[in-house]
Image (cartoon, rainbow, N blue to C red):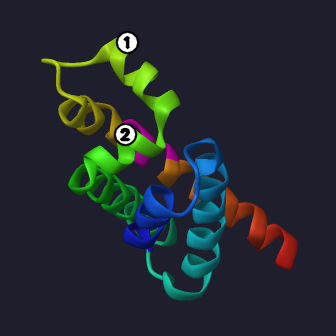
Amino acid sequence: MGIISGLLTLFVIPGEYELLVWLSLIITIAAIEINFFKERPYLSKFMFAVLAGASVTLTHLLFLNSYLESHKAEIKNLDSIKVYDSYGLTLLIIAPFYWLLLGLMSCLAKLLIAQIRK
């Protein structure tokens, strides 16, 4: 799921709409996890979301030039914190914070979906 999202944000969906991809990823992860992770649901959900985020980042790193071409606004953000003049290294350093946020948001979305289903 993360690799598909990563490829979509690289080659199909413009960078300015990437937030919508992340929101749909959060909702999809929450919906999938409600049905599949019964044991330790929040830890499993959190780890699943972190792995999805990591696979998105891996996809972006593998196609870094395409990522930078389709995410012009992101270049400005990366320039402000660029490590050793390397966009890839900078992306790799800040990405885990996004993975953690994705994990937390998917857990919250799961709680919301569970409440709606009652």
Q: Quadrant of the C terminus?
A: bottom right
Percent across and percent down for residue 55 are 32, 62
Left or right: where 116 falls relative to 55: right
Residue at 37% in and 12% down? 80
Residue 35 lies in the magenta-colored region: no
Left or right: where 46 falls relative to 16: left
Residue for badge 2: 68
Secondary structure of the residue carrying tag 2 is helix
Secondary structure of the residue carrying tag 1 is helix
Q: Quadrant of the N terminus?
A: bottom left
Residue 63 versus residue 31 in the image, above or below: above
For residue 80, the mark is 1
Label 1, label 2: how far apart the Cα atoms are: 15 Å
Boundaries of the magenta span: 97-101
| Number of the front mark, 1 or 2 | 2
Percent across and percent down for residue 41 are 50, 72
Q: Are marks 1 and 2 in contact (CB under 8 Å)?
A: no
Q: Main secondary structure of the magenta part?
A: helix
Report crowding for label 1: few under 14, some 14 to 19, many 20 or more residues within 10 A (C-alpha). few
Percent across and percent down for residue 113 are 76, 69
Left or right: where 20 falls relative to 33: right
Residue at 25% in and 30% down? 87
Q: Closest to the observer: 117 or 9?
A: 9
Q: Earlier in the sequence, mark 1 or mark 2?
A: 2
Residue at 44% in and 21% down? 77
Q: Amino acid at mark 2?
A: Leu
Percent across and percent down for residue 17 are 65, 48
Residue at 19% in and 19% down? 83
Q: Closest to the observer: 23 or 67?
A: 67
Left or right: where 61 falls relative to 48: left
Q: Closest to the observer: 91 or 51?
A: 91
